[in-house]
Image (cartoon, rainbow, N blue to C red):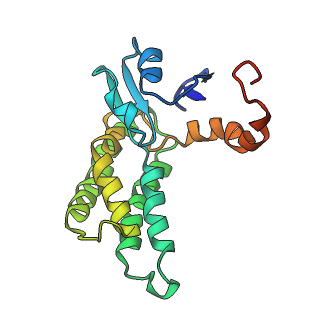
Amino acid sequence: MWLYRTSGDTEQPIVLFEYQPDRKGIRPDEFLKDFKGFLHTDGYEVYHKLSGEIIVCGCWAHARRKFDEALKSLPPSEHIGSKALEGKGFCDRLFKIEKNLDDCNPEDRYERRQELANLILDKFLSWLNTCNALPKSALGKAVNYALNQWKYLKNYILDGRCEISNNRAERSIKPFVIGRKNFLFSDTVRGA
């Protein structure tokens, strides 16, 4: 199931579900062939190969979750002062800025992001590049995810209408995720 929806900055939200038999990149490519603008996504690679008219905004909730998982992989006594906590802290600061911008119009949100978020993004990128985490460790996976997604993660600050995460879409698809095991009886497209 492919999900397409408008952002939170619209007066009349639209949520569209499109069934396709697979997760091939041709599906969003066909659906979005005439679309121009920002597209919020998780880190699924097929979105990164879409038309040049589409600016992909990565999801900071996914990046933050990786650092949270790295933190949870440590014994509680090692949390304070850990690099995992430090990485998560950068993400938390970005989310705190967004929370404080909830009531802003898109123009003001854009300006405030340039003023506040840009500085944190620069420091975080520098930190990521010097972190020296073991690649297969939970922290290494978090750092590599953030670095691999960086060009998409930073795009949310390009427009005040963009969101820091794709949580809105994640919440919209949740009924399908929760019901997945209940849908096993639908073993054909026609049955579904």
Q: Name the residue rendered at 37%, 79% in the picture.
A: 82
Q: Is residue 11 above or below residue 114?
A: above
Q: For the C terminus, which image quadrant? A: top right
- Residue at the outermost bottom position: 77
**Rendering coords of residue 70 (x, y %):** 44, 69
Residue 18 is left or right of residue 67, and the answer is right
Q: Name the residue rendered at 50%, 84% in the picture.
A: 75
Residue 158 occupies quadrant: top left
- In this view, the residue in front, 161 or 155, is 155
**Rendering coords of residue 94 (x, y %):** 40, 54
**Rendering coords of residue 180 (x, y %):** 71, 40
**Rendering coords of residue 127 (x, y %):** 24, 65
- In this view, the residue in front, 99 or 92, is 92
Q: Name the residue rendered at 43%, 49% in the picture.
A: 60
Question: How many marks are shown on the rendered structure?
Answer: 0
Residue 92 occupies quadrant: bottom left
Query: Residue 159, can we see it?
Result: no
Residue 184 is left or right of residue 53, and the answer is right
Q: Is residue 74 above or below residue 35?
A: below
- In this view, the residue in front, 157 or 27, is 27
Residue 146 occupies quadrant: bottom left
